[in-house]
Image (spheres, helix red, strand yellow):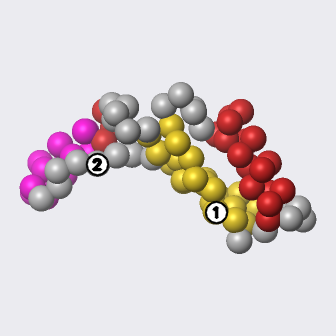
Amino acid sequence: MKARIYITLRAGVLDPQGKAVVASLKTLGFDEVQGARIGKFIELELDGASREAAIERIGKMCEKLLANTVIENYRIEVD
């Protein structure tokens, strides 16, 4: 089973990396870019559990290690 985890900054959290990307893109002539938010994408291969059990386990992984839940949100997709 394959799982995808999308981790993004919560609304209102400053994103200096996103600001740097916008500034660099503007320097390269991409003036239409007005904002960028940088996040993380994690893909996991999992053994045997049911889809529901996998989502529950991945949620625990995110809460304990993969995401900083004080400033980040996460979304889980499982195939």
Using residue 10 as the reference point, say whether residue 42 is left or right of it.
Answer: right
Where are the magenta residues, as a range? 19-31
Q: Nearer the viewer, residue 69 or 42?
A: 69
Q: Position of residue 45 (x, y in %)?
A: 76, 61
Residue drawn at point x = 25 percent, y = 39 percent: 19
CB under 8 Å between callouts 2 and 1?
A: no
Q: Nearer the viewer, residue 50 or 65?
A: 50
Q: Residues within 10 Å of mark 2 (few under 14, many from 20)?
A: some
Q: Position of residue 56 (x, y in %)?
A: 78, 50
Q: Position of residue 54 (x, y in %)?
A: 80, 57
Residue identified by numbered label 1: 77
Q: Is residue 34 above or below residue 20?
A: below
* Mark closest to the chain's N terminus, 2 or 1: 2
Residue drawn at point x = 67 percent, y = 41 percent: 62
Mark 2 to mark 1 CA distance (whole Å) = 23 Å
The amino acid at mark 2 is Ala
Residue drawn at point x = 80 percent, y = 60 percent: 52
- Residue 13 drawn in magenta: no
- In terms of secondary structure, where does tag 2 sit? loop
Residue identified by numbered label 2: 36
Residue 65 marker: none
Q: Main secondary structure of the magenta part?
A: helix
Q: Position of residue 66 (x, y in %)?
A: 64, 40
Q: Quadrant of residue 10?
A: top left
- In terms of secondary structure, where does tag 1 sit? strand
Residue drawn at point x = 79 percent, y = 65 percent: 51
Q: Is residue 50 above or below residue 40?
A: below
Quadrant location of the C terminus in the rendered image: bottom right
